[in-house]
Image (spheres, helix red, strand yellow):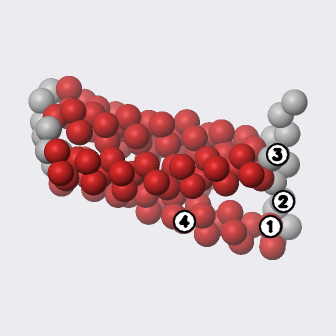
Amino acid sequence: MIDAFTIVLIAGSTLAGVLCVVLGLVGRKPSDVSILAVVVVEALLLAQVVIALIAPATGNQPTGNLAEFWVYLVAACLMPPAAIAWALTDRTRWSTVVLGVAALAIAVMVYRMNQIWTVQLA
């Protein structure tokens, strides 16, 4: 089962990704809107880090591989700063597309992290 925060994180990442990809494909250079959309995704990921650190203490133990979960979470947290840094230094329409692809990849990673935490996969 997917909790409300995970739904918000997946929806936010997907929305930011689609927004940035569309802006990039129509030829827009990175704007404050596209960069801010990815910054919001990063803020939500940092909140996820805090939740993941606190959850085991409250009795919410992961059912899957904890190392795999943390690898996904750390990788997801590193993607937005890298994409934003490139967008700020390159300032081409393709850097806007990269912002979007990073956000869409994060949506998939968050879904997988939810599966690791809540569903034991064979």
Instruction: Kindly identify the residue that appears in the image at 31 percent across and 37 percent down.
Output: 98
Residue highlighted by disc 2: 61
Instruction: Kindly identify the residue that appears in the image at 68 percent across and 63 percent down.
Output: 52
Which tag, 3 or 4, sits closer to the chain's start? Answer: 4
Please tell me which residue lies in front, 26 or 80: 80
> How busy is the neighbourhood of tag 4: few (under 14 within 10 Å), some, or many (20 plus)?
some
Answer above or below: position of 94 versus 74: above
* Type of amino acid at the residue the image marks with label 2: Gln
Numbered circle sitting on residue 56: 1
Q: Separation of disc 4 and disc 1 at Cα?
A: 15 Å
Which tag, 1 or 3, sits closer to the chain's start? Answer: 1
Which tag, 4 or 1, sits closer to the chain's start? Answer: 4
Cβ atoms at labels 2 and 1 below 8 Å apart: yes
Residue highlighted by disc 4: 47
> How busy is the neighbourhood of tag 2: few (under 14 within 10 Å), some, or many (20 plus)?
few
* Type of amino acid at the residue the image marks with label 3: Gly
Q: Separation of disc 2 and disc 4 at Cα?
A: 18 Å
Instruction: Kindly identify the residue that appears in the image at 51 percent across and 64 percent down.
Output: 46
Residue 91 appears left or right of 114: left
Q: Separation of disc 1 and disc 3 at Cα?
A: 13 Å
Numbered circle sitting on residue 116: none
Quarter placement of the C terminus: top right
